[in-house]
Amino acid sequence: MKITFGLALDGFRPSVPGFNHLYCGPHGLVQALELRLGLATESTGGAMRLNQYLRVLENTSADNKCFFSESLKVDRWGTAATLLNMRDELRMAGWNGADSPMPRLQDLSVVEKQTQKCLAPGLPDRIERICAEIVTSSLGISEIQCVEPAEHLPFRLRCLLEKLGAIFSCMPDPELAGPATNLRLVQDCLCGRDISGKSWSEGDDSVVFATAFSEITLAHAAVQMLRSEERPTLLATASSVPMADVLNISQTPAPALDSASPLRPVAQVLGLALEMRWEPPDPSILLQFLSHPVCPIGHGLRMALAESVADRPGIGSKGWCDAIEKCRERTRGKLSPEEVAGELSRIEKDLEDWIFVERFPRKDGASGATLAETARRVEAWARKRAAVPTDEPQSRHFASLASTAAEFSGIIKESTTVSPEELSHILEQVSGSGPVAGDRIAELGAPRCLADAGAAIEPTDSILWWGFEQQEPRLSKRWSLEELEHLGKVGVRLPTAENHLALARARAKRPFLAARKQIVLLWPRSRGGDPVERHPLCTILEAKLGPLPIRNLDRDESLIKIDRPVRPLPLKKRWINLSDSTALASRREESYSSLSKFALRPFEWVFHYKAKLRRGSLKEINLLAQRGNLLHRVVERLLEPGCQVKWISATNDEFNCWLESIWPRLLETEGANFLMPGSQTGGQRLLGDALLSILDLVRHMKEADAVSAEADVHMEPIPFEGTMLGGIIDLKMTNRQGKTAVVDLKFRQAKPKRKELATNTALQLAAYGKLVSEKSGGVWPAVAYYILRSRSLLAQDLTFFLHPLLIKCSSASPGSEAMWSAFLDVWRWRRKQLDSGWIEVPIEGTDATDGTSGCPSSVPPLAEWTSDPSAPRYDDFKSLTGWEATQ
């Protein structure tokens, strides 16, 4: 067998495969030799090996005062990872663990003596074992060619190759580019030939330096070159996701541009499941776990629970319990009696295994055995999913997750206590760089692809280098000059910074020497908001050949030719007309929110209710509404029939004691985000707001001589203009004289609500007043807003409350009955427009119409009901209603 070896050749595939010819890097070479020598053993994961070394460090530190003892107390896993890297670096450089007069080296020597039987071998240990066996074994290797100079190789690896009789620096002679080209000039420069008096030739595209602000712009340029007849070899040394996406949408044959990532959905399940073990449970993590693309909980149950958590962050709220019960009811209704028991049992087991689990305070840490139990559950679930005949990449992901969970369980099970920080360290070590997606394979006709500049060992006409940027890691100074001097005396040859730089430069030169006609070098100016440094080779070329002819693709379009016509975005317009108005017919039932959209922003009513356009399914906790929701819930609890205190007779102290007793449980079930570190002060502040605002609300109720009150009142629908009208009233009360009042609770919004009462356009209060009047023989109730944040009761009159903040109304006929009557005129006006197919879009950037330009008039029957396009609001449909001409 013939072997071609290079530090960057692990995974390399030659353009023309040869029989019995192996191309490999360090790992491939060691595996091949171990197989031939009968030394192959089951590999040990890096995290498990780190755990083994950590145990040795802790034992050593317990018996002796070592240089790493204090660091080990502060950061066990980080310290162990650093020391294991130092140990392997020393071993690769020829260190054998001998005693040393240098204190740090002596401590590491003591540790090394304890690792003989309990530390799985690393790459240098495996190489040492192979070297010992080569003397007495025949390997059947005819020739080993090493493309690296011997001085660039780590010491033990160089010794192994020398024992095998390797020939070093076996790079093929470059087939140089044509004379008088920029590519030939660069090749001569990198090979050390005389280039005095020479500089870049204008108009010569044999070497192209190109950059852009966006990687998408670069990706389009790269794809256009890959589609050309030249078909350059692709060298991708940076993330190629943008280019893979552009290749896909342009229907261009793509190579297997895959990269490993720990952020792939399947790989994230273990971390999310382990995070469920902390007390208090983080609602954002709970929501991520339930709404994740893959989850061990049944789809119907977890989606219902996710809806509950997004609305009321926590576990155990009324909505949470209702979601579980509805899931059980759906199961009973859609399955046969024989299947129901099994499915109900699965629901209970899902809750028991993943939700209602034992939890541990973050400050105290969690039991390692308990965390290992969760990991074993993830492993068992992942193995079942891997065995299901689905697409192959997905099965590989589940198999990888099962392996990761098993390794994590083996590491963590013996730990007495694990802190959240340690858990993150272990997960990071176990997950590594994550699994490869595996869903991208090289398509027929795709260009050849390399992942490392050092792998460019074959001549090729053209090379496209994606990611021509700074990539060499910053070298950390681990050893003092005295330590390096001592190590050199005992035969330990650690690579110097000069060695690293020489190796990096030698590998970076290879693509230039491999190209025969052209090399194109692409890099972005920014990635993720951070500037990207160009490749260090640019500095060398600039010093010898003058300023580089760099093309800015944001301005220079010579490399990007768009062959599709550009379609302008649609401009904003005030009216949309449908030829078939039957699609705009009335709905079966309306509510306040739909009435508001219908009257003031009819396009929202059409898009939301008729076109059924909705936000994406990605669920999130609405933190802006969270405070108001919790205070609403306190009012509901206070007015429940079984409440421990009676609002009508309780003293302030009794109310305070009651609220403080229910508050912790309320946060656990509906406001767990306020229990998280950093948010607890906000929860305490909100408790203070609740004490003051609800006491003030009760004071207003008592002054009005109220004798009964209900919260969250579901009103039966009533007939309304050919349809039905329904709603839920925040607060409804009756006083001793039999008068009724409706109060809508708002956490804030004092200014807009005052304006509504001043102009007699408080549609929400009018709609609720109409619902109550229909059920009370036509008697309209008093109406008011109560602003919880500012403790303001807003009303137009004193017909019910004695001391509200009176809002002077400009209307000649104030009150909810007059509001409703005026709104009916507006409703019928809008209904007539929709019946004719006209939909108004009253947004900023459009002008109102007067009915003379072929479009209906934008002016409603009553001017105060005119929509204000400039009013601040979040618009779900902003991108659907047109763009400014300048955009």
Image (cartoon, rainbow, N blue to C red):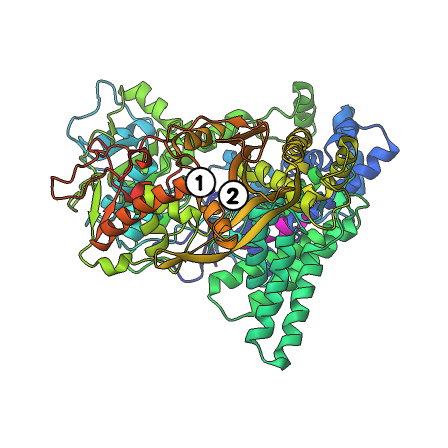
Extreme residue toward the left, this view: 853
782 and 685: which one is in front? 782
Magenta part of the chain: 266-274
Few, some or many residues within 10 Å of mark 1 (<14, 14–19, 20+): many
Few, some or many residues within 10 Å of mark 2 (<14, 14–19, 20+): many
Amino acid carrying label 2: it is Pro
Amino acid carrying label 1: it is Ser
Q: Residue at x 32, y 37 (%)?
A: 865
535 and 294: which one is in front? 294
Image side of residue 163 versus residue 482, left or right: left
Q: Is residue 743 visible?
A: yes
Q: Disc number at residue 816? A: 1
Q: Disc number at residue 781? A: 2
Above or below: residue 722 compared with residue 76: below
Q: Residue at x 35, y 53 (%)?
A: 255
Image side of residue 644 versus residue 421, left or right: right
Above or below: residue 569 compared with residue 45: above
Circle 2 sits in a helix, a strand or a loop, which is it?
loop
